[in-house]
Image: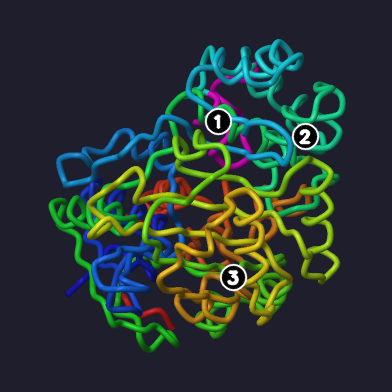
Amino acid sequence: MSLDAVIIGSGPNGLSAAIELAGRGASVLVLEAREQIGGGMRTAELTVPGLRHDVCSACHPMGVLSPYWRTLPLADHGLEWVFPAASVAHPLDDGPAVLLRRSVDQTAAGLGADGAAYKRLLAPFLRNPHGLLRDALAPLGLPRNPLLMLRFALVALRSARGLAEARFSGQRARALFAGCAAHSILPLESKATAALGVMFSLTAHVESWPVARGGSASIAAALASLLEQRGGRIETGAHVRSLADLPPARVYLFDTSPAQLADIAEPVLPARYLARLRRYRYGPGAFKLDLALDGPIPWTDPACLDASTVHLGGTFDEIAAAEAAVWRGEHPERPYVLVCQQTVQDASRSRDGQHTAYAYCHVPSGSTVDLTGVIEGQIERFAPGFCDRILARHTMNTADFERRNPNYRGGAITGGVADLGQLFARPVARLNPYTTPNRRILICSASTPPGGGVHGMCGYHAARTAARRIANQPATPLR
């Protein structure tokens, strides 16, 4: 069968690329090595029968706001977002938790004297949040909203510490901002870490961070259903190890890590380009703990149950110290921990009153240290009695992450370091980051702009480039 495009990998970007190309009339085949599609969008019974755990991605602020996915009829294909009362809860040792709610005014009211400064920070971007997201989630180029993007750059290209100390005087606002900025998996003193703090705060005021009903696998299922409706095909259990495993096609899009692209396509790519792919920096990994509980987490502040995501780590300085330690190759005693409470929002994942807890922390790349006790200690710190509710555990270290999804090199779950040196020049510096020196090969994974997250924008932008090349290429084997 003559194919226009073959996509290697069925993560959010691979499926998005396939949908975009199929929608333009191209014949598309997606090859997935595992039996379950989805990449980071997988759900499984990891602890006890009947309890559904998200294997990687859990809450989806960028998914519900993705400029591309917002144009797709995913609800018609079974995707239902479940919205919590708050996006984030950030408990503190002294006083009530800080809540990041959809209402800017309600959020600001919990920040004390910094409430007005918080509103001033976000107000310019909330006038046109979807325009900002469309430009921010695109490769480097001329934005549609240049003045808005310039204003965002002036704020966001600072370090998270620099912005927090310049804008806020109190610990509550600084802690909330630290928790959002630490999603960058960079030291909070690094340039551009403020961008994640501002962006994640902004998204929470556009839509509360949702979970997908039934599990993150529901997102993959909806994307696959839409792709099949448009004539595309998916083959699972199709492990691509070399060019010999690829059928003839006009173009090939790799939803893989740069290292996988280099290994598979080595015979048809120049040595210098391969060397640059292999120098790509992946950064720290993650250690994840999934728990079955006999009830909800007993937070000291019950308002934490309103949030789909809980950021644990205390003050700005404590979170900053933990993230810096990870970059030095250390395992902090009190790490920054992200907790997701999917069953509190989505009862379809639970059974017999039981709940799940999803928690992970950042660790040095390749770490095999078991941090179960450390993570449980951080949760117990803000939820005394938590450990008494544990029925069963499941752990994943960096090797487990990479084994389940080879894109997570060394356990790096966001596609690689997103500092200034690699924010736009990913995986290598090129005018069009999705292209390679071989016109028939493109890369569309989270290792391309705009980077990690379940939003499909890397795949969408790569597909637009691929569509322009299909007409000029023969459908032949890649040799």
Residue 437 found in image quarter: bottom right
2 or 1: tag closer to the N-terminus: 1
Q: Name the kind of residue labelled 1 in the image.
A: Asp
Q: Is residue 279 visible?
A: yes
Q: Nearer the viewer, residue 41 or 417?
A: 41
Residue 367 found in image quarter: bottom right
Residue 157: give x, y in percent of width and height: 77, 34
1 or 3: tag closer to the N-terminus: 1
Residue 85: give x, y in percent of width and height: 41, 30
Above or below, 166 relative to 322: above
Q: Nearer the viewer, residue 34 or 248?
A: 34
CA neighbours of label 3 inside 10 A, class few (<14), some (14 to 19), many (20+):
many
**Real-space CA distance between mark 2 and mark 1, rounded to the nearest whole angstrom:** 15 Å
- Name the residue that disc number 2 marks: 157
Q: Is residue 473 visible?
A: no
- Name the residue that disc number 3 marks: 258
Q: Nearer the viewer, residue 178 or 34?
A: 178
In this picture, which residue range is highlighted in magenta?
132-147
Number of the label disc, if any, that sits on residue 407: none
Q: Name the kind of residue labelled 3 in the image.
A: Pro
Callout 1 secondary element: helix
The quadrant of the image that shows the N terminus is bottom left
| Relative to 158, 451 lies left or right | left
Which residue is at 72% across, 59% downward?
335
Which of label 2 and label 1 is nearer to you?
Answer: 2
Which residue is at 60% across, 74% downward?
409
Residue 273: give x, y in percent of width and height: 67, 71
- Name the residue that disc number 1 marks: 135
